[in-house]
């Protein structure tokens, strides 16, 4: 969704309709109205996106069930907890972009002159963040669809499934166990479902997405404004997000959650769409 469309359809977009010659909103009113509009807009997008994704990943689509190869040691790796867990991932990929945008817009607000600066701060912060959220949601749905369409077994599939070996015949290591014949003793069906969605790596895709946003957004703002504080923020955060993205990608393999090709698939998928993301974020 374009910035113009967001200005027309969001509560926060109303705050940008004030012209320079109009009477300036008093500080208290601007803070209250801006805060309420910001909270409403972000809450609406998050609630709708999360609800749709929970339905989509729960009952909307199921992974393609591949036959289990008896002799494939690659899917018999031990289960390990995530180094970069889901909460960690969400804090960095959903929470930190808002703080970064708010910080940059706060610096611009402090440096700017003219009327209704607070209203413009709240509006610009919210609309920029909403653009990120909508792109993030679209990418997340695309990843889930690809995961289910491919249905690749994770490296720890056997450890999670815990097959009832008394009901399957794996004496021939070249044979495959049909999904209808495979009995998993793990009582948690959600974990078994997740173990069938290895390609591509969702963690890596999300990490690369937030890195791409931080890099493009801070580069654009630093170049367009020339403000030294924003340049400093860029010089500090871009290397940090680069390191974090690499760590996230590498640990997906070392934690036995993904194969190297799953991680590469996430990167190449984002590189393929790089031009479209660049065009959207640079506006």
Image: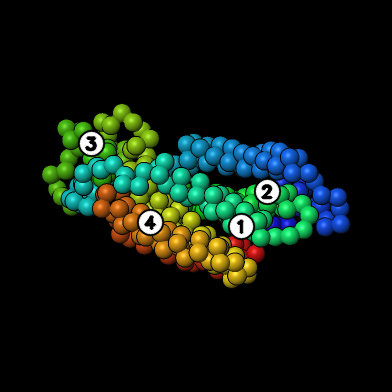
The foreground one among 128 and 251 is 128
**Left or right of residue 32: residue 221:** left
Q: Position of residue 259 (x, y in %)?
A: 29, 56
Task: Tell me where residue 119 appears, x and y as whole percent.
Answer: 73, 49
Q: Quadrant of the N terminus?
A: bottom right
- In terms of sequence position, does the residue under pointer 1 or pointer 4 come before the other? 1
> Distance between the Cα atoms at labels 4 and 2?
29 Å
Q: At 45% across and 62% down in the image, what residue appears?
A: 236
Compared to 221, does 169 lie above or below?
above
2 or 3: tag closer to the N-terminus: 2
* Residue 229, numbered label: none
Q: Which mark is residue 244?
A: 4
Q: Is residue 163 above or below residue 101?
A: above
Label 2 sits on residue = 122
**Mark earlier in primary sequence (3, 1):** 1
How far is disc 2 from disc 1 in space, using C-alphas?
13 Å
Mark earlier in primary sequence (3, 4): 3
Query: Tag 1 or tag 2, which sits nearer the N-term?
Result: 1
Residue lying furthest left? 171
Residues under labels 3 and 1: Cα distance? 57 Å
Q: How is the image coloured?
A: rainbow
Q: Which residue is mark 3?
A: 163
- CA–CA distance between discs 3 and 4? 36 Å
User: Helix, strand, or loop for circle 3?
Assistant: loop
Q: Position of residue 196 (x, y in %)?
A: 35, 45
Q: What numbered label is drawn on residue 107?
A: 1
Distance from disc 1 to disc 4, alpha carbons, whole Å, reads 25 Å
């Amino acid at each position: 969704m374009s910035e113009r469309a967001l200005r027309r359809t969001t509560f926060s977009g109303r705050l940008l309709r004030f012209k320079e010659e109009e009477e300036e909103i008093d500080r208290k009113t601007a803070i209250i109205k801006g805060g309420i509009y910001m909270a409403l807009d972000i809450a609406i997008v998050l609630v709708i996106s999360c609800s749709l994704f929970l339905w989509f990943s729960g009952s909307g689509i199921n992974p393609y069930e591949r036959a289990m190869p008896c002799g494939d040691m690659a899917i018999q790796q031990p289960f390990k907890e995530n180094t970069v867990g889901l909460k960690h991932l969400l804090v960095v990929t959903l929470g930190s972009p808002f703080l970064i945008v708010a910080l940059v817009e706060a610096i611009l607000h402090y440096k700017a002159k003219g009327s209704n600066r607070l209203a413009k701060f709240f509006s610009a912060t919210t609309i920029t963040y909403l653009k990120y959220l909508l792109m993030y949601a679209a990418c997340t749905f695309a990843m889930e669809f690809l995961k289910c369409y491919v249905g690749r077994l994770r490296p720890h599939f056997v450890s999670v499934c815990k097959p009832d070996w008394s009901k399957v015949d794996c004496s021939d290591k070249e044979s495959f166990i049909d999904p209808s014949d495979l009995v998993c003793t793990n009582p948690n069906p959600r974990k078994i479902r997740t173990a069938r969605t290895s390609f591509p790596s969702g963690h890596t895709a999300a990490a690369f997405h937030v890195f791409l946003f931080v890099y493009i957004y801070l580069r654009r703002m630093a170049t367009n404004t020339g403000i030294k504080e924003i340049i400093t923020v860029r010089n500090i955060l871009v290397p940090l997000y680069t390191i974090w993205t690499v760590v996230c990608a590498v640990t997906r393999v070392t934690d036995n959650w993904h194969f190297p090709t799953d991680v590469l698939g996430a990167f190449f998928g984002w590189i393929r769409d790089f031009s479209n993301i660049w065009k959207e974020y640079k506006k």
